[in-house]
Amino acid sequence: MKSKGVHFLEEPREESRGMVAAFSDLYGNKRDWLELKKRGKQASFDPSNET
């Protein structure tokens, strides 16, 4: 996502339901990307790998 020009507002963080990454869209609106945990597995998020 970073390679596509996405501006992240903070580092991704782990919360109870999974990983959260806050970013702003083209118009300056704050958006949250949520990657839910799978049962019994650890969540992970690497914005440099997303397309």
Image: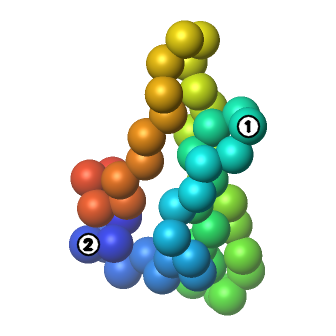
Residue 51 can be seen in this image: no
Residue extending furthest top? 40
| Amino acid type of the residue that numbered disc 2 sits on in the rendered structure | Ser
Residue at 44% x, 76% y is 6
Q: Left or right: 47 with respect to 48?
A: right
Residue 47 spot, x, y in % from top left: 37, 59
What residue does disc 1 label? 16
Residue depth check, mark 2 versus mark 1: number of the one nearer the observer: 1
The answer to whether 39 is drawn above or below residue 3 in the figure is above
Res 22 → quadrant? bottom right
Q: Secondary structure at mark 2?
A: helix
Q: Secondary structure at mark 1?
A: loop
In this rendered view, identify the residue nearer to me: 21 or 51: 21
**Label 1 CA crowd tier, 10 Å (few <14, some 14–19, many 20+):** few
What residue does disc 2 label? 3
In this rendered view, identify the residue nearer to me: 42 or 9: 42
